[in-house]
Image (tube, helix red, strand yellow):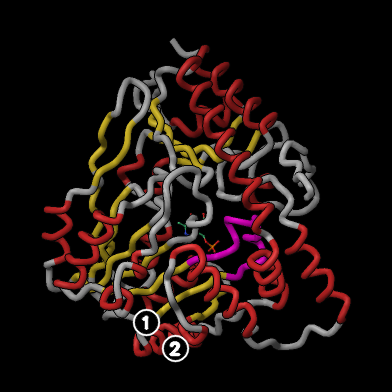
Amino acid sequence: MSKFNFDEVLDRSGHHSAKWGAVAADCLPMWVADMDFRSPPAAIDAMIARARHGIFGYTLDPPQLKEVVVERMSRLYNWQIQPEDVLFSPGLVLGLCATGKGFGKPGDAILIQAPVYGPFFKAATSNQKYALSLDMAYVADDAHSFHYENDYEAFEAAASQPQTTMHLQCNPQNPAGFLYSRAELERVAEICLRHKLLIVADEIHSDLILEGAHIPIAALDEEIAQNCITMIAPSKTYNLAGLSCSVLIAQNAEVRARLAAALGSISAHVNIMGYEAAYGAYSGGDEWLRQLLIYLKSNRDFALDFIRRQLPQIKTTVPQATYLLWLDMRALPIDGDVNAFFRERAGVALSPGEFFGDAGKGFLRLNFGCPRSILEQGLRRLKAAVEQLP
Ligand SMILES: Cc1ncc(COP(=O)(O)O)c(C=O)c1O
């Protein structure tokens, strides 16, 4: 069995990487959720084999990709879906925006909980809808870490407003990296059902579990499944984001038809290589993923330990999932833009907290999906910059 070498530092220059291309040559990019690892051989080989065929005309959704998704949901979550429940989209953000377009009417509110992945707001605002954003409660665990909790009273009050027609949920949560428990999912689903809110579950990070177990909200029961669109993708898991292939699951035929119509109205087609890589990764990438998760967990623990010991002014979440660490920088004596400070003074580019809504002000997100040597260098640079502060 091959051992994958996640320590290898790969040169991404000359390949128009968004992550590396957006920063100065001497700056370490630890921002956008894209890993600095080579994808699994199964994904690469599938694309090479398809490229050799040499004809790349318009394509249909591959039935075997639907089958592999059905099998995966059953195997991982005991969630029984059918091939016809599966649609594809060139990217999950596009799927979120298509959902905002296809459901409800202008002026409706989409209920979200912040801080959360920025395009959740866009799914509402790009469709003449209102992003009804509730701040999750910040709860300190100890001197070093914190987590968020949902305010269910506020959630119920927001859900009960007549103009609120949809809830976008992010599980595993980006940027905080937590997993919703079964009890929390049941509570959210019950409120959404009672107030007739469509649940749109962005579960793109669901393969990236460092500890605990992911539960798809639609797998809770049939009534919830009928009121839900679930979005997953091989893109985060297998580092295939540039190939733009995401999976949308809708078990309710009417919901699915509306979603398909919204995707069709903007000619949202996945490209051949996206399908090939997705199929290759889902059907042959399990061992790579198993080894990746061990590596990511050890990177997470390394970063947490480093920050606790050497940067005690920074508080962090302890992510159960994702390769993202959410940093509370508010105790640092930095005047002005905290992200610009670290870019300019540390030479490290992190994701700005404001991208995740107003609740993200004073926070930054660090991507630890990289070789350990890069992570260590990035953390040392952060430390050196903090030491320059008064
Ligand atoms: C929660 C979440 N949804 C969606 C995406 C992006 O999906 P895509 O690149 O398929 O549009 C990301 C990327 O970081 C994400 O974290």
State the quadrant of the C terminus.
top left
The amino acid sitting under disc 2 is Ala
The secondary structure type at the circle numbered 2 is helix
Is 39 on the left-hand or right-hand side of 215? right
Residue at image point 44% right, 40% down: 319
Placement of 265 over or under 294, stated as above or below: below
Image coordinates for residue 12, horizontal then vertical, percent: 76, 46
Residue at image point 68% right, 60% down: 285
Q: Is residue 377 visible?
A: yes
Crowd class of label 2 (few under 14; some 14 to 19; many from 20; radius 10 Å): some
- Mark 1, residue position: 102
Whether ligand 1 has any atom under 8 Å from the Cβ at mark 1 is answered as: no
Residue at image point 49% right, 60% down: 204
- Mark 2, residue position: 261
Q: Which residues are magenta?
A: 232-245
* Image quadrant where residue 228 sits: bottom left
Image coordinates for residue 167, horizontal then vertical, percent: 28, 66
Q: Which one is nearer the viewer's eye here, 311 or 220?
A: 220
